[in-house]
Amino acid sequence: SASVPFPQNQRVLQSMMDWAEQLIIDGLDLVLGPQLSVLLFRAVSHDAGALAAWAETNRRSGALLCLSTTWHGETVLRICVVNPSTDPDEVLAVLRTLQ
């Protein structure tokens, strides 16, 4: 079972988990989550360079801090939810731009 050190973040993480099935349909696979307050996603149709560029664009704009990282030799996206007021629908809207 998942461990969430900040109980107030459980709502955000649970909401994101509830959307996992839809994300798979939208071209994202949940790789790991939630572990502490971290979720890992695989963007099915994007290579490492495209993921890094997408992450940097969203970081610079302030839309979402979702960085690319390596998990078992594969480039994936990493989200760490630390703000209990994070709106999962806003996060998912940005993730859907990966389609």
Image (cartoon, rainbow, N blue to C red):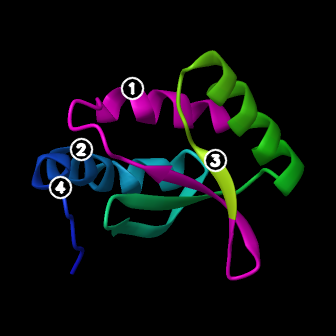
Q: Nearer the viewer, mark 4 or mark 1?
A: 4
Q: Residue at x 68, y 22 (%)?
A: 60
According to the picture, the residue beneath numbered tag 2 turns out to be: 12
| Distance CA(mark 2)–CA(mark 3) | 18 Å
Q: Residue at x 21, y 81 (%)?
A: 1
Magenta span covers which residues?
A: 70-99
Where is residue 18 shown, x and y percent of the image? 26, 52
| Distance CA(mark 2)–CA(mark 1) | 11 Å
Q: Nearer the viewer, mark 2 or mark 3?
A: 3
Amino acid type indicated by mark 1: Glu
Judge whether 34 appears above or below 62 on screen: below
Front one among 42 and 10: 10
| Distance CA(mark 4)–CA(mark 3) | 21 Å
Residue 90 tag number: 1
| Distance CA(mark 4)–CA(mark 1) | 20 Å
Q: Are marks 4 and 3 in contact (CB under 8 Å)?
A: no
